[in-house]
Amino acid sequence: MTQDFAWLHRGVVEVFPQPVDADSKSESLEKRLLTTNQPLRIKWGIDPTGADIHVGHSIPVRKLRAFQDAGHTAVLIIGDFTARIGDPTGKSEVRSQLTEAQVVQNAQTYLDQLRPILDFDTPGRLEIRYNSEWLSQLDLGKVLELLSTMTVGQMLAKEGFAERYKKENPIFIHEFLYPLMQGYDSVAIKADVELGATDQKFNIAVGRDLQRHFGQTPQFGMLLPILIGTDGAQKMSKSLNNYVGLSEHPGQKYQKLQGVPDHLLSQYFELLTDLPLDQLPENPRDRQTLLAWEVVKQYHGETAAQEAKEAAQSGGKEGAVPEFSLADVQQFPTKLAYILNVTGLCKSTGEGKRKIQEGGVRLDGDRITDVDTTFADPAELQGKVLQVGKNKFVRLVS
């Protein structure tokens, strides 16, 4: 085990608990890493509440990979059970509950998008667990035991709950269960370390308390930053259109990353790449170009990165995305399955319908699953990128 922990602390906001002082008898994570005689179990969970992941979501996954490379076991928890409630952290109102079918479909797309980051192949380096495995088996007695470990006052201290209570916005009892269920995940898989964004400290701390309650050694918490979006102001979010999606065309990725504001470049390099931070170009424009190249290369390979770079240098605003003229669609209104056929993304309208049903069709990153999706006018599609699978794209133009 190496004693160089530069990889451990890169991009980390906080590791807790920490010894009070050098003479403290309490253990640090570094000491645990140095003295353990077996791989630690590093937990990160994600609720498949949507279909797509952006580079902000990749931050804890990259840290998982760093632990894998250091010889430890990444435990990726797909919250197929908790997703049906939804994490109330930071929410001003109750989240919509998803169906089991929606969760299953979203989970598969998440795994597909995480493959370029994690080591899926080396035996013992990755466990993929679905928390319905243990949460669906909890009887009322066990649920009552979990509830007995926290008070209402403690729960109202959670981010978002106090504000909602003050404003008299409804807080439903099932939302109180969420932190306890996430914490019980740590008990079920015997986590040594849990990764999460800074807004997850409460939930991770609940996991420590529950492990202690069930006679386990409490996990360490590792908190990572929430990435600011490409607008330079608000956290990265698809709804704010300031995101870089993992499933986006490499040309689109390259263009977006080339436009990251100067004041965010250091953070993006620290969190999204492994490049030495003291060896970056001084010129901001050169930094933007290097960032775009490095991230696209990670997910699509060097050839795709080179093609995206050349497209950007040649003045192609949207990168190397081929265009299709909507004038070639003979009539409107028309169904999406027909457009998939005439664009050449599918060999027939029937294949187009199958791809839609399978969840393999996206329009500007939004997955479409209704085979009867119809567009009344070309203006609805102008400038949008139509995608089938991972590698087939066209931009629809008039």
Image: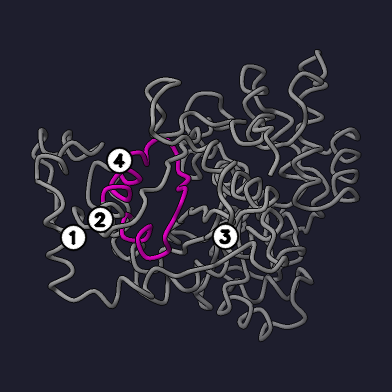
Q: Amino acid at mark 4?
A: Phe
Q: Nearer the viewer, residue 143 or 236?
A: 143
Q: Residue at x 59, y 41 (%)?
A: 34
Q: Hey, which quadrant is residue 264 in on the image?
A: top right
Q: Residue at x 31, y 54 (%)?
A: 211
**First-in-chain label (3 vs 2):** 2
Measured Cα–Cα span from mark 3 to mark 2 = 49 Å
Q: Residue at x 14, y 49 (%)?
A: 150
Q: Amino acid at mark 1?
A: Leu
Q: Hey, which quadrant is residue 215 in on the image?
A: bottom left
Query: Residue 314: percent from the left, percent from the top?
Result: 91, 35
Q: Which residue is mark 1?
A: 146
Q: Is residue 192 placed above or below 225 in the rendered structure?
A: below
Local secondary structure at mark 4: helix
Q: Hey, which quadrant is residue 266 in on the image?
A: top right
Local secondary structure at mark 2: helix
**First-in-chain label (3 vs 4):** 4
**First-in-chain label (2 vs 4):** 2
Circle 2 packing at 10 Å, graded few (<14), some (14-19), many (20+), is many
Quarter of the image with the N terminus in it: top right
Local secondary structure at mark 3: loop
Q: Residue at x 41, y 20 (%)?
A: 21
Query: Residue 348: percent from the left, percent from the top?
Result: 73, 83
Labelled disc at residue 377:
3
Labelled disc at residue 202:
4
Measured Cα–Cα span from mark 1 to mark 4 = 16 Å
Does 265 sit left or right of 107 as displayed?
right
Magenta stretch prevailing secondary structure = helix
Does 195 sit left or right of 121 as displayed?
left
Labelled disc at residue 180:
2
